Amino acid sequence: MRYGIVSDIHGNLEALSAVLEAIGTVDQIMCPGDIVGYGPNPNECCEIIGDLKVISVLGNHDAACVGRHDLEWFNPHAQTAILWTRDRLAKSHADRLLERPEIHSGPEFLIVHGSITQPLEFDYITSPWRAGESFAEMDEHAICFIGHTHIAEIYAYKLHHLGADQIPKCEGGKLTLAPGFKYIVNCGSVGQPRDGNPLASYGIYDSEENTIEICRVEYDMPTTQRKMIEAGLPDALWQRLEYGM
Ligand code: ZN
């Protein structure tokens, strides 16, 4: 099977469209959460994700936009965008977000937004140490796809060894999965990268080749920024897109 991974889309329709075009034909698309929040096109992004029958889990912004997560948890700019999204999100899309599970457990892999240990606490995996807590709870699964940090990177843990390797992938690149390892894979963010690379980020997992490739693609950022300005979203939110931060 070939899977496309699109995480942290955040209502950025131009980035999602460019990524889906770059992914082309795959057997299944997966989203480790945050379809909405920040960006100007939450309904359009939910529509596309619904039409493609994407396997997806609940992100913290998805949860906040439908009242399943406390607004106080977020910084002021994020809160403004969440309230803006709440006011505009169609009920049908909100209902579907409400139904999203916190963890997807498939035969070949897990998907969670933040970390496996406490999925609804939305912890950030940003170090091998933090990854270690989730590796310990992966049971028989060799791969867990995450999002949340908006940083493209892979954590590799050799079974029965201490620690894990943190493999940066902010410029993209392919990794062949080795037997005897477990992996936590963050394919970066489609709609608001924060790893210093402003290009939209996505992943391809080929379960027959046993490879994961993280890719970056240009999108029509000026259009997204113009829509955000017209929508009255905070300046910092459209400005940060240029810097990938
Ligand atoms: Zn996010």
Image: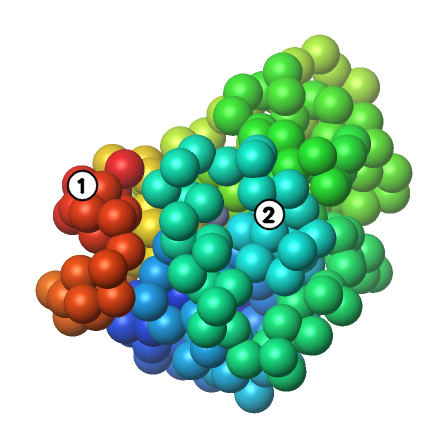
Q: Could you tell me which residue is drawn at 48 percent across and 68 percent down? A: 87
At label 2, the amino acid type is: Asn
Q: Could you tell me which residue is drawn at 28 percent across and 72 percent down? A: 14
- Judged left or right of residue 63, residue 13 is left
Q: Is residue 23 above or below residue 36?
A: below
Determine the secondary structure under disc 2: helix
Give neighbour class at mark 1: few <14, some 14-19, many 20+ (Cα, 10 Å): some
- The residue that mark 2 highlights is 60
User: Which mark identifies residue 204?
Assistant: none
Q: Which quarter of the image is occupied by the C terminus?
A: top left
- Percent across and percent down for residue 8 are 47, 54
Q: Could you tell me which residue is drawn at 87 percent across and 38 percent down? A: 139
At label 1, the amino acid type is: Tyr
- The residue that mark 1 highlights is 243
- Judged left or right of residue 66, residue 102 is right
Q: CA distance from mark 2 to mark 1?
A: 23 Å
- Percent across and percent down for residue 117 are 78, 32
Determine if the C-beta at disc 2 is less than 8 A from ligand 1: yes
Q: Could you tell me which residue is drawn at 77 percent across and 59 percent down? A: 101
Q: Please report contact status of discs 2 and 1: CB closer than 8 Å, yes or no.
A: no
Quarter where residue 125 is shown: top right
